[in-house]
Amino acid sequence: MAQRHRGPVSKLKTRLWSNPPFANVTSLAAAVVAASGVLDAVTSNPGVLGSAWTWLWTGVAAVAVSIPAMLGSRFPPVCALVGCYLFIAVTAVQMAVSTQGIVAINNLIFYPMLACYLGWCFSRLIARTATGVAITASGVALAFNPSSALVVTWINLMLASLFCLEAASYLHRRLQRQVETDPLTGALNRIGFRRIIAKQLRDFEKTAVSLALVIVDLDHFKQVNDQHGHHVGDQVLAQLVAEVRANVRSTDVVARIGGDEFVIVLPGIDERGARAIVDRLHAATTSSWSSGIAFSQHGDTVDTVLARADLELLVAKRASRSSG
C-alpha cells in the first residue's frame, strides 16, 4: 500500500504538537504582537516615529514567530527573555513620544499578557524583575507623554499586570508541585526526581561539587501487603519517608520512583559522608531496607548515575538474601 503523502500543513501540525509548550506559547505571543503592529500600521497615524518604525518592529515580531516553533526544545529561554525586554523598550519609546492616547493605550494593553507570560514561564525572581522593569519604563515614558489623561489607565493596567504575574506564578508553581509530588508519601515522584537530579548534574559539571545518589528498596514489602493489606503498606511507605526526611539535611532530596523504591539525593558530599548518612538512616528508620550508592562522574546523565546505584543495590540485596 502506497504511503500517504503528508502536506505542509500536516507537517506543521505535527511539528507544533511535538514542540514543548514554552516554544509554542512564545511563538503565539510574538504572533499577537506582530498582528497588533500591523493593525497599528494600517489604522493609526504614524506620529513622530513614522510608519517605518512601526513596520520595523512588526517585522521583527513576525520573524520571532518562526524561531521558537522551528527550534522547539532547543529554543533557549534567554532569547524569549531578551524579546520581552525588547518589547518593553519599544513600547516605552512609543508611549513617550505618542501624541495619540489610543496608541499609548494599545501598548499598555499588552502588559498584563506580558506579566502572565513571565509569571508562568520563568522563575519568580526573573518574572518579577522583568515586570518591575516594564512598570518602571512605562511610567517614565508616561511622564514624557503630553497627555495626562492616561495616568488612571496606566495605574489600572499595571495593577492588572501585577495580578496576572502573581496569579500565573502561583498557579504554575502549584501545578508543578502537584505534577512532581507523590500524593501518598509527599516525596517527589519520578518526574520531580529527574528534574532535580538533571539540574544538579549540570551544576556538578560546572562546579565539580560532588553529588551522591542513594537508591533505597524496602525488604519483604510484598509480604507486608499480602499479610496486612495495602493500607498498612501505604502507612509503611509514608512512615519511611517521614523518618528519612527527619534525619537528612534540608538540602537533600527524597523521591519515590517506584512502588517501594526510593532515592535520596545528597548534594555536596563525599563518599565517606554519604555512607555515614546511610548508616544513620538504617538506625533511625523502623523498616528494613537495602540500598545502593552512586557518586557523580563527569559526563553522567540521570540514567547512568541511577544505573550505578541500582547495580550496587542489586549486590546488596543478593548479599542480604544469602546472609538471611
Image (cartoon, rainbow, N blue to C red):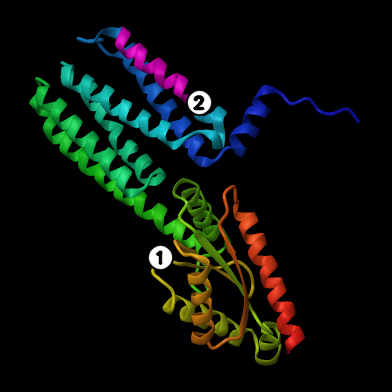
Which residue occupies the foreground of this view, 189 or 31?
Answer: 189
- Classify residue 59 by image quadrant: top left
Judging by the rendered image, the residue that carries numbered circle 2 is 67
Residue extent of the magenta highlight:
52-67
Callout 1: SS: loop
Which mark is on residue 149? Answer: none
* Residue that appears at 48% across and 71% down: 273
Residue 258 appears at what percent x and percent y? 63, 69
Q: Main secondary structure of the magenta part?
A: helix
Q: CA distance from mark 2 to mark 1?
A: 38 Å
Estimate how packed mark 2 is, as few (under 14), some (14 to 19) or many (20 or more) residues with alpha carbons within 10 Å: some
Where the N terminus falls, by quadrant? top right
Residue 52 appears at what percent x and percent y? 32, 7
Res 102 seen here: no
Which residue occupies the foreground of this view, 37 or 79?
Answer: 79
| Residue type highlighted by circle 1 | Thr
Whether residue 136 is situated above or below residue 252 in the rendered picture: above
Judging by the rendered image, the residue that carries numbered circle 1 is 251
In the image, taking residue 156 as reference, residue 316 lies left or right, namely right
